[in-house]
Amino acid sequence: MSPHAARPAAAPSPGTGFRVYRPALPEVCPRDPARMALAADAGGRCEIFTWHAATGTARQVTDSPDGTLHCALDADARVWWFAEDRRGAGRWYFQDFDGGPRLPGLTGLPPGLPYGLAVSHAGTVAIGLGDGHGMTVHLGMPGGPARAVHTVDGHALLAGISPSGGLLALSGAAGSDRAVTLLTCSGALLDQLSGRTGRLWALGFAPSPAGTELLLVQEADGHYRLATWRPGAGLRAQDWCRFDTEITARWYPEGRRVLVRQDRHGRSTLAAADLDRRTLTPVPSPPGTLLDAAPHPGDDVHYLWTDAATPPQMRSTAGTRLPALATLPARVPGRHRELWTPGPDGPVHTLLSEPDSAPGRRPPLVFLVHGGPADHDRDAYDPEVHSLVASGFAVARVNYRGSTGYGPRWRTAFGAGVGLTQVADLVAVRTDLLRRGLAREDAIGLWGTSWGGYLALLALGTRPDLWQAGVAVKPVADCVAAHRAGTPALRALDERLFGGTPDDVPERYARSSPLHYAAQVRAPLLVIAATLDAKCPPGQVRGYLTALREAGVPHESLWLETGHDGYSGAHHVAVLRRAMGFLDQHLRRAPAAPRTPRSAADGVFGGTGPSGAPECTTHVP
């Protein structure tokens, strides 16, 4: 499981006012591809369902007060799910596809953080559980006692188990010298693959019954390439299969073929790589973004496609029946285009969405800042963009330096300092949009979540004269406090970006911390935070709010009783409504009620709001 799990989505539903689900492909049973499992709506929260493609029938598997998001489906058609509390800690359980008792994945395990699940064709289950300091891999037969085989200090993920159950692969922290570790299932070390010259991560063992070949992606010489590993043969780079921007890949069920998905300049493509013939064959897909893609028997490829004007759609190259996603009753409003702004490390790419207004009118503009930083905005449907554009705002989504999809050099370009480099790109795009006559200097706001919320706060503090409003959702507000209270994965990320810990390079952390500039904020500011957030901990947000109060800076705050990745549509609706109303109030001279779509395929729209109002405060000196 990734430490940066995709957030669930929400759309209206009769009776509750909204429905939620995760826009991701269903898990498919390797031995019976008609059997699938996925997270979908159950009364305003995500729960796990089975889906049978041959009959089109579904069955709800889980029923949790706070929802369930993570699931898997093994070769024996057992449905697995992670039952967690609001802090993200929990246990794995499973149930037969057609029902029956709920059983623990392995017995004798305490609650922990989900750092990986893998089930071999032979039936052995491997579970990676974190405790906030490290990760331990446990093995056993489903429902049987757990046996701890390996512990890693710091951040690591269980990347896979070989089909026979004899080998394990672990991926370490980004930038680690031991990027991938190979073990036997007794815990004996087989190999450690170095990431010293560039990132290296494991993508799973070949699915053939006797398969021991591991698939990897390796960053080297300004490119990304496929690589493989076998016991005794070591790492072998597939130099013929190179790409200039980020890729991910999955084994086909038969043969030594791999489906490669490339993200490039905000869009995606697919190709089939034959490792024996050393050929790369495009797999046709529509222009836009592929949020996920997976190969299945008979050369069938399932993919999740979207573009800026189309909510995500599940498609199959072989015509396999897939679960339907929520759609919209009318077209997505607005005009969508892209712009490139000159910059010191190359042009900065911006996706611009404008309302269907009369030509020549310049609407208020919102910079919707993506998180990460190792992520990017895509030519993809975004419900926040939809809601803003439908309410008469223009929206700029900037793939600043540090974003993925533009190559290794772009991703590591932090020359002006962490955060400060990205703010410089936001400022450059703002200047360009004004020069082109696409924005009004007196009506420009910022809205970001997680690392995007961090950049919004940093931009408001370091360039206070440029913005008229800001919204920061679950942000990093104090880089030092966030590092000390954060997860192992995010501490490792901080140390890679800053070049050390806060004790090693205190001046770098201070210079890049929004807390350092809190007294300089001038624009109206809304901070939304979560009391159970482990990634952007609540203490460091409270410290920032205290600094604003002591400096007499007007601001508002909203607290949610959830973690960083909440599964409740009510919380998402609360954030959307509050942020939209705040931006509408401060960026318009003649306020108008914000509009939201009637349904959506990612994010939150419509709905009745939470049953219990979150804690809300306004501070005006």
Image (spheres, grey):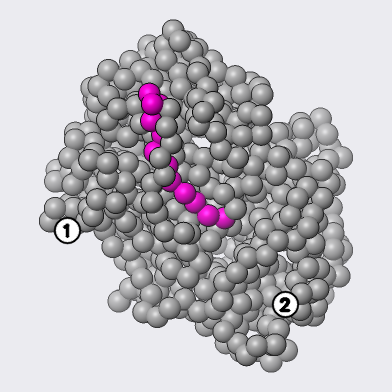
Q: Which residues are magenta?
A: 266-277
Which residue, given by chain and number where applicable, does mark 1 sit on?
A: 56
At x 28%, y 33%, the residue is 253
Q: Is 208 rendered above or below residue 431?
A: above
SS state under label 1? loop
User: Marks 2 and 1, Cα distance to the nearest angstrom?
Assistant: 47 Å
Q: Is 63 drawn above or below residue 504 in the view shown?
A: below
Q: Where is residue 116 drawn, in percent x and y?
A: 42, 33
- Using the image as rendered, state which of residue 27 and residue 507 is in the foreground: 27
Residue at screen point 38% across, 23% down? 276
Q: Residue at x 28, y 62 (%)?
A: 324
Q: Where in the figure is residue 143, as x and y percent of width and height?
A: 24, 29
- In the picture, measured across the screen, residue 414 lies left or right of residue 45, that is right
The three-letter amino acid code for the residue at tag 2 is Leu
Mark 2 or 1, nearer chain start: 1
Q: Which residue is mark 2?
A: 438
Q: Nearer the viewer, residue 328 or 140?
A: 328
Helix, strand or loop status at disc 2: loop
Q: On the rendered image, what quadrant is the C terminus found in?
A: bottom right
